Image (cartoon, grey):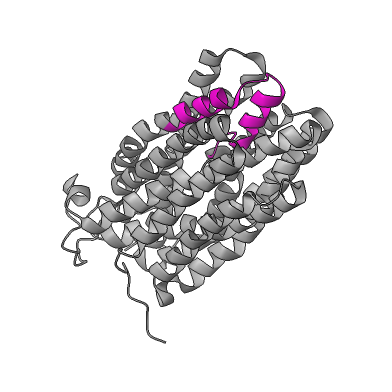
Amino acid sequence: MVQSPTPRSNRALDALNFFLADVRDGLGPYLAIYLLAVHHWEPASIGLVMTLAGLAALVTQTPAGGLIDRIVCKRAAVAVAAMLVTGCCVILPWVHGFSVVAVTQALSAAAASIFAPAIAAISLGMTGPKAFTRRTGRNETFNHAGNACAALLAGGLSYLFGPVAVFYLMAAMALCSVVAIANIAPQAIDHDLARGFDASAAAPADAVPGWRALLGSRSLLLFALCCALFHLANAAMLPLVSQKLSQLNMSLATPLTSACIVAAQLVMVPAAMLVGARADRWGRKPLLLAGFAILPVRAVLYTLSDNPYWLVAVQMLDGVGAGLFGALFPLVVKDLTQGSGRFNICLGALTTAFGLGAALSNGLAGLVVQAAGFSMAFLTLGAIAALALLLLFLLPETRQPASD
């Protein structure tokens, strides 16, 4: 049986999700603004750097999940990865060449691949499967609150000191995340439960060890494809909005991008809370469908106006889609791998699938922007999102709703 975590360990996990929020995604859209505003890079070059970083995450995500399944020093892995990500970001003001920027961002993305499986494993190891839904909703709530807080600080600091301030804000958040992970008691984590192993549980027929857990499961493969298409459509949208804002008003580009992030993150908080409170009762699929349906609508709305306030308002819809998806993703993987002991490697492999989509998204969008403009890029991404929604209808419910 898992040992009940102390209130201190629970609060430390909350703090970890809060402070790691700004670190786990790297510079994100701020990188596009920095390269465009300071170094005057072309959109295609910016997209290529972000694509290379995404590909680095793609290569390392599944091994990262496998590593977390095997090791017991999960807390140390998170701390080391946080410091590596930060080091790769704070060096950017001192380098300018394409090759150096690409290498540092690829290394940052590779280090960041440890975060998702590590946090999911620590959470599952602390709570066990029965309380995992509520813990995941709580994780995502603090994650989005941290993102909103970091974006507000980034907007204010960059307005006062320029885009470079974002790099140093990330360093401070990383140090706080290291302090948080150190305050989670090692004995609070059951490392068998953390990898989804339960000898007493009746494992589903397709939850078998090793790679057969992926290759032999139609539901996992279909979910992986839906995730890849969702992120192929979604990942480039905010960077595209950031570039549009840069063209409209360069001095306000970073603050307005921060406003976009804050608007979305504030919506993601109640979305994550809804998943934590209701996903066991209502099931996963209705909430997933709602999250996927928002994305093509958002893509079309971006094309209707260049007004900065309109763009920020539309970005709020990202809070619904990404908020629901982010909280539901580890739950669906846990459902499909329960009892196999392969939770984290499967989580890493499916994160690789949507990482592939995210990696290709910025490159695809950059090419479409240069060939046909921003509106066509948004419509192209919207069509991909619509395809992801149609395929999701084929995915069976992974957990039956509980009766009232």
Residue appearing at x 79%, y 37% in the figure:
252
Question: x%, y% of residue 309?
Answer: 76, 51
Q: Is residue 99 depicted above or below 301 in this figure?
A: above
Residue sticking out furthest to the right: 160
Q: Nearer the viewer, residue 240 or 165?
A: 240
Residue drawn 41% across and 41% down?
A: 357
Percent position (x, y) of residue 77? 43, 36
Determine the main secondary structure of the stretch shown in magenta.
Answer: helix
Up-down relation of residue 67 to residue 93 (above or below) = below
**Magenta highlight range:** 25-54
The answer to whether 297 appears left or right of 206 in the picture is right
Residue 116 located left or right of residue 274 = left
The part of the image, by quadrant, that contains residue 69 is: top left
Number of numbered discs overlaid on the protein picture: 0
Q: Quadrant of the N terminus?
A: bottom left
Residue 302 position in % (x across, y down): 63, 50
Q: Quadrant of residue 110?
A: top left
Report the front residue among 172 and 263: 263
262, 183: nearer the viewer: 262
| The magenta stretch spans residue 52 | yes
**Res. 54 in view:** yes
Picture residue at 42% right of the left edge, 38% below the top: 114
Residues 281 and 185: in front is 281
Residue 238 is one of the magenta-drawn residues = no
Q: Position of residue 63 (x, y in %)?
A: 31, 35
Q: Quadrant of the C terminus?
A: bottom left
Residue 196 seen by the camera: no
Which residue ends up furthest to the bottom in the rendered image? Answer: 404
